[in-house]
Every structure is written in C-alpha cells, then in structure tokens.
Image (spheres, rainbow, N blue to C red):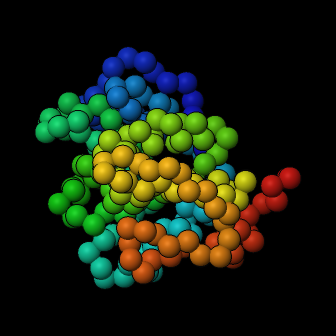
Amino acid sequence: MTLLQPDHRHSTYADYLSWPDDVRYELIDGVAYLMSPAPTLDHQDVVGEIYYQLRQALGDQPCRAYVSPVDVRVPRADEDDAEIDTVVQPDVLVICDRAKTDRRGVRGGPDFVVEVLSPGTAGHDHVRKRQVYERAGVREYWLVHPVDRTLTVYRLEQGRFGGAAVTELAGETPVGVLPGVVIAWDALVGRLASPEG
C-alpha cells in the first residue's frame, strides 16, 4: 500500500463521511491522507494470517479481532463524532471493550493494533500513526515489516509507549496484552516473496 499526497485542509469525521466510498483515506489531526487501493499480496497474506491466528486464539473471549478496513475514530476529549479530526484504519486490531464499537466502527483506542509496513507507508505508520495510537491509549502496537522480516513492538507504559523492541519474524511472539495469545511466524514467512525479488 502506498501513501499518496495528503490534503492539508482541516477536515473532520463529518467531512470524511461525505467522501467517495471507493477511495480510502485516513484522517490525522484534520489532515486527510489518501491511501492507495491495492496492497501487495504479501501485505494481504500477513494481515490475513495475523487476523486468522488472533480470531482462532481469542475464540469466545470478550476480546474480538477485526481486519481493515475498519474506521477507528480517535476523539481528543468528548466531542461529537462529527467533530473528531482523526480517523485511522489499522490493518488488524483487537477490541476488548465492546462499548467502543458501534455500526460505524470503533470510537477510542483499540487494545492491540498491527500495521503491516510497505515502503510507501513505513514513515506514516512509524511516526504519525504511532503518535495517534499512543494518544488513543492503544496498549500494544506492532509494526510488521515483511521485506526485512522484522517486528517492532511498542507497549504503553504510564500513558506513553516505551522503547521499541525489535525482533525477527521467527518462531512465536506473544501478544503482551492478550494473555495466552501468540503469533506464529515460520509458515507465514516461508510463503513470502524473497526479499531480493
């Protein structure tokens, strides 16, 4: 997926709802970022596999996994939805508080978020979205880099993300905020395109 040129006019969720359904945007602090419509097959495989493993592991627990596109509205305080100026679409997310969900998606921070990086979105995910997720109170944030075969993990500590933990996509990685849930990498990595190709 490639991040296209941002529109620097200040927009809100009310504006966002009026935009065409066939074009995907994210709205961060009132700035609209146009997302390209076609992620790579590797990107989709990683997203789908992580979602599948989470759904299997969570079973009938109160926490529920979702896969993009799902609008996550991030209010600054208690403003009406129409006034919210940050709406993101994480690749994979887990919500444990069902009161945060409604027919339009999610209002407030998910408990767990995964973004799968591509060259066009890496900076957006590492900087802008990390700041949004920290502000929203996301308890754990993963950035998966399929080309480099690495995982960067941020965990919320006293309202802020602690230092990044970087590991290889190998073996299993436990999801710290979801006890007993792990993501297994080896079979998935074996399916990915060669980093050289």
Relative to the observer, which residue lies in front, 93 or 133?
133
- Horizontally, is 38 left or right of 58 in the view? right
Q: In the rendered image, which quarter contains the N terminus?
A: top right
Tell me: residue 173, above or below residue 24: below
Residue displayed at 64% across by 61% down: 167
- Horizontally, is 50 left or right of 158 in the view? right
Specify the farthest residue to the right: 196
Relative to the observer, which residue lies in front, 126 or 10?
126
Q: Quadrant of residue 75?
A: top left
Residue 59 image position (x, y, % from top left) = 37, 82
Q: Quadrant of residue 58?
A: bottom left
Residue 50 image position (x, y, % from top left) = 53, 68
Residue 82 image position (x, y, % from top left) = 20, 33
Specify the farthest residue to the top: 9
Kindly tell me whether residue 68 is visible in this rendering.
no
Q: How many marks?
A: 0
Residue displayed at 33% across by 20% down: 10
Residue displayed at 65% across by 76% down: 171
Residue 32 image position (x, y, % from top left) = 42, 28
Residue displayed at 42% across by 56% down: 155
Relative to the observer, which residue lies in front, 25 or 92?
92
Tell me: residue 108, above or below residue 76: below
- Horizontally, is 72 left or right of 89 in the view? left
Tell me: residue 21, above or below residue 144: above
Q: Quadrant of residue 65?
A: bottom left
Tell me: residue 154, above or below residue 84: below
Relative to the observer, which residue lies in front, 41 or 8?
8
Kindly tell me whether residue 185 is visible in this rendering.
yes
